[in-house]
């Protein structure tokens, strides 16, 4: 293992308002071993570089500029720059607890562990509380993640740790060829599912994935995300992401149209079932809307395949 025991990586794109607090939460870690902090500036046009340079006197801090926009691209760049065997990713609008790195680091004494992440709580904007129409399921789209207060080894990919509080063993990342740029967020398009795919790969190859409640992170909720339109847009891109993930897994074709149609009808049916509950009703409508995105991506793929013949 290299001298640096764990590398904390922040991938950022135009989040100078939050970035300083994220970096400071890492600089203030209660962790006796050696660690580094890598900030990957993913094509930012705001004060991102200035925020990092303001803290550049700390030798733990590294800055790298990645001009190709995309979260997965930035994550892969961070992995290349980092020097340790354990890579811990923190979102640029999140704040880690002071034992975050310590908890993650010691979890990897388990030689079978490929991925680990922790509990995520939400920080609401000043003067704003959780809207009545926001279900626990949709709160997960804001980053909320809580599987309880004991360590859990994940068996279902749908329960995978959130990317904003996420660590991975370098050897496993290299084994699967890095983060897939087809699934990570690119600018304002909300492609996702890369963590879910990673967990699928890990479990298929006999690795373990862990939820560590003490590796706690708090995630800032931007006020613009507390609009119904944001969740509908997020659901649309979630549907597209799921379609791409299936295609990458060899499940493309006409069967996707049937799956998407069935899910769409199911979402509408459940929205009617929960008509008197504004939070659950909206949750199911977002799900149904996401299936339109899924079907749109499936149709585009079928047309593209047909045109190539």
Image (cartoon, grey):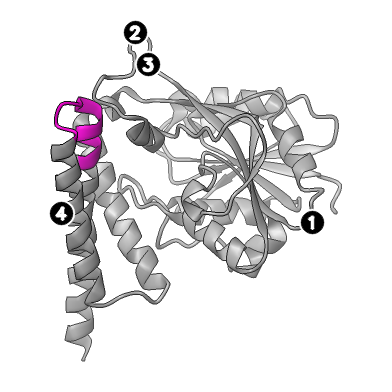
Q: Which residue is mark 3?
A: 125
Residue 276 painted magenta = yes
Q: Which of the numbered marks, if any, corresponds to residue 111?
A: 1
Q: Mark 2 highlights which residue?
A: 127
- The front one of 40 and 102 is 102
Q: Helix or strand or loop: what does disc 4 sit on?
A: helix
Mark nearer the N terminus (2 vs 4): 2
- Residue 139 seen: yes
Q: Residues within 10 Å of mark 3 (few under 14, many from 20)?
A: few
Mark 3 vs 1, N-terminal side: 1
Q: Nearer the viewer, residue 141 or 40?
A: 141
The secondary element bearing badge 1 is classed as loop
Query: Which is closer to the viewer, label 3 or label 4?
Result: 4
Give the magenta range.
274-284
Which of discs 1 and 2 lies nearer the camera? The answer is 1
Q: Earlier in the sequence, mark 1 or mark 2?
A: 1
> How far separated are the C-alphas under marks 3 and 1?
40 Å
Q: Which residue is mark 4?
A: 265
Label 2 SS: loop
Q: State which mark lies toward you, 3 or 1.
A: 1
Judge the density around disc 4: few (<14), some (14-19), many (≥20) Cα neighbours within 10 Å. Answer: few
């Amino acid at each position: 293992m290299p001298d640096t025991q764990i590398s904390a990586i922040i991938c950022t794109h135009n989040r100078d308002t939050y970035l300083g607090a994220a970096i400071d939460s890492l600089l203030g870690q209660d962790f006796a071993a050696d660690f580094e902090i890598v900030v990957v500036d993913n094509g930012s046009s705001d004060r991102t570089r200035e925020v990092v340079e303001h803290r550049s006197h700390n030798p733990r801090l590294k800055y790298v500029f990645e001009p190709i926009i995309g979260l997965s691209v930035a994550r892969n760049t961070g992995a290349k720059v980092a020097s340790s065997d354990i890579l811990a990713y923190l979102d640029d609008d999140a704040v880690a607890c002071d034992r975050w790195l310590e908890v993650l680091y010691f979890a990897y004494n388990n030689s079978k562990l490929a991925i680990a992440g922790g509990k995520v709580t939400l920080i609401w904007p000043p003067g704003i509380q959780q809207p009545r129409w926001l279900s626990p399921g949709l709160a997960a789209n804001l980053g909320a993640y809580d599987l309880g207060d004991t360590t859990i080894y994940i068996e279902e990919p749908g329960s995978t740790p959130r990317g904003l509080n996420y660590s991975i063993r370098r050897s496993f990342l290299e084994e699967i060829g890095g983060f897939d740029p087809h699934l990570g967020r690119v600018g304002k398009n909300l492609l996702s599912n890369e963590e879910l795919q990673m967990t699928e790969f890990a479990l298929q190859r006999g690795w373990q994935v862990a939820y560590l409640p003490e590796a706690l992170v708090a995630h800032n909720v931007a006020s613009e995300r507390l609009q119904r339109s944001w969740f509908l847009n997020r659901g649309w891109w979630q549907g597209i992401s799921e379609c791409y993930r299936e295609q990458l897994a060899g499940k493309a074709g006409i069967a996707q149209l049937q799956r998407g149609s069935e899910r769409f009808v199911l979402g509408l049916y459940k929205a009617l079932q929960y008509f008197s509950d504004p939070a659950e009703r909206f949750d199911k409508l977002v799900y149904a809307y996401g299936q339109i995105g899924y079907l749109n991506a499936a149709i585009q793929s079928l047309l593209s395949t047909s045109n190539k013949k």
